[in-house]
Image (cartoon, rainbow, N blue to C red):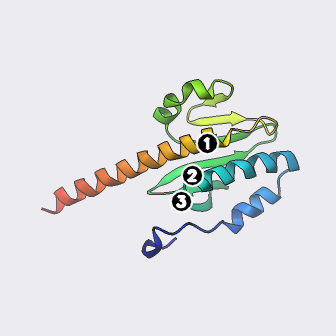
Amino acid sequence: MTKDNKNAASAPSKDVEKYLAALPKETRSALEQLRKAIRAAAPKAEEIISYQIPTYKYHGPLVHFVARKDYCSFIVISKPVLETFKSQLKPYDISGTTIHFSAERPLPAALVTKLVKARIADNEAAQESKEKNYGRQKR
């Protein structure tokens, strides 16, 4: 996404489509649902492959997801965000800033939306803080 086109929705990544196409059907279906929820919650986020996994960037890293042999992971990058939604995440295993789930029990789209929107708010606040601090340094 170019800086001139910041307000436009980001195009789907062909690399992410290839990543998903290589997965077993059940896993692919669960991660396609996750991807759809992420893209709906963060239409301005750039969708790329980073560190060999699907990644979304909006004012910096936003979220990632990954398929493993026996489970899927949604990497939220923020412990405070996970803490905020702790009660809704009880059915899932959490390690650090990562939510693990099975293809048979994917994350609900409504929960993904809440998590992604919380991350957007985090990144926007961090960006605003950077811009304020940069302005102070220039004086």
Marks 1 and 2, how far apart at CA:
8 Å
Q: Are marks 1 and 3 in contact (CB under 8 Å)?
A: no
**Residue 47 percent coordinates (x, y):** 60, 61
- Looking at numbered disc 2 in the image, what kind of residue is underneath it? Ala
Residue 94 lies left or right of residue 102; in this view the side is left
* The disc label shown at residue 41, or none: 2
Q: Are marks 1 and 2 in contact (CB under 8 Å)?
A: yes
Q: Secondary structure at mark 2?
A: helix
- Looking at numbered disc 1 in the image, what kind of residue is underneath it? Val
- Residue depicted at x 43% and y 47%: 121
**Residue 76 percent coordinates (x, y):** 56, 42
Closer to the chain start, of discs 1 and 2, is: 2
Residue designated by label 1:
112
> Vertically, is 139 above or below 72?
below
Residue designated by label 3:
45
- Looking at numbered disc 3 in the image, what kind of residue is underneath it? Ala
**Residue 73 percent coordinates (x, y):** 68, 40
Residue 75 visible: yes
